[in-house]
Structures are given as C-alpha cells and as structure tokens.
Amino acid sequence: MPDSFTDAALLLVGHGSTQNADSGAPVFHQAAELRRRGLFAVVREGFWKQDPRLLDVVPQISQPRVFIVPIFISEGYFSEEVIPRALGFHLDSQGESGRLIERVGQRLFYCRSVGSHESLAGVLLARARQVVGQFPFPRAPKPQDTTLFIAGHGTEQNENSRKAIER
C-alpha cells in the first residue's frame, strides 16, 4: 500500500527570477494542482530568487515530514549544490546520501529534481502531442514532419546541469 502523506508537507522549490515574476508560474500552478488533490497536509512554494523565499518558507512548516522537491530540469548546480547547502543538507559528491535532516519532531527529505525522472522525455512528448492536437493550424502535421526543440542551458559550475536537456 502506498505511503500516506496526510501528515506531511510538500515544498516545491523553483529557481525564480528577480527580473521576471512570471518565471515562478509553473511552480505555483503545480502547487495549486497538488493542493487541489489533497494528497499532502500542506503544499507550499519556495524560490531561490523571488518571493516567497525558500529560506523563509521552510521554518514556517511544522508538519512532522517535509518533502522538499526541486522543480528543476536537472540535478545540477542549484538543485544539488546551492539549495541543499543553504538548507543544511550535506549531499555526497554523487548525491546518494545526505538527503535527510532529522530535527526534534520533524524529518526533512531533500528529493531529486523532477527533471531527473526517467519518464520526463515521455511526459514532454505527450504534452507536445496534446498541444499539436489542440491547435492543428491549419492542419495537424504528421509526426514525421514535426520537430520538437527543447531549449536549456548548463553551467560551468556543474556539468550535470545540461545532462537532462541532452537526454
């Protein structure tokens, strides 16, 4: 039987932007949908570079289990180094250990980035098919006549930042 999360908080973490407030829209949208489903006692959003600030949100969460999920496309510089370090996690160089902090009455779990999940490519392709089907102007193209471009960037700070895009 699947774990019940009715005593747990889910914190979705986005990068955010000081230049474009709309950059957080996907995280807000996902959090709203998860709140609607009622799977967790609490669903919150937190950002590195915009409000609500991640480091301000974490202390406000009182549930005994807190799942912190980076809404990032890869396990790169921000999601595997900057953010976990700021939260007090000590990940090893492969990110295999150090994803749990135990406090009095509370356990914080630092999850892998959603973009690292093996099914992400299938999700992107399914969404592209849905968009083409919804907007077949002037007619829906044949799959062999269609190209999907996925834009992303990496950083010299961590070579893993671009691996998910390449995959």
Image (cartoon, helix red, strand yellow):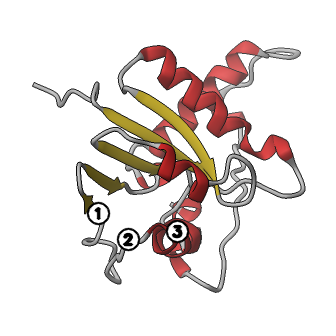
Q: Residue furthest left?
A: 1
Secondary element at image label 1? strand
Which residue is found at the position 27% from the left and 59% from the top?
103
Return the mark for residue 101: 1
Which residue is found at the position 49% from the left and 22% from the top?
35
| Amino acid type shown at disc 2 | Phe
Which residue is found at the position 61% from the left and 85% from the top?
157
Secondary element at image label 3? helix
The percent coordinates of residue 110 (x first, y second) are 37, 58
Return the mark for residue 89: 2
Q: Residues within 10 Å of mark 1 (few under 14, many from 20)?
A: some
Q: Residues within 10 Å of mark 2 (few under 14, many from 20)?
A: some
Whether residue 161 can be seen here? yes
| Amino acid type shown at disc 3 | Lys
| Amino acid type shown at disc 1 | Ile
Circles 2 and 1, Cβ within 8 Å, touching? The answer is yes
Residue 56, located in which quarter of the rendered image? bottom right
Of marks 2 and 3, which one's residue comes earlier in the chain? Answer: 2
Q: Residues within 10 Å of mark 3 (few under 14, many from 20)?
A: some
Q: Which residue is tagged 3?
A: 163
Name the quadrant of the N terminus. top left
C-alpha distance separating marks 2 and 1: 7 Å
C-alpha distance separating marks 1 and 3: 28 Å
Q: Nearer the viewer, residue 127 or 137?
A: 127
**Would residue 149 be found to the left or right of residue 60 on screen?**
right
Circles 1 and 3, Cβ within 8 Å, touching? The answer is no
The percent coordinates of residue 98 (x first, y second) are 28, 71
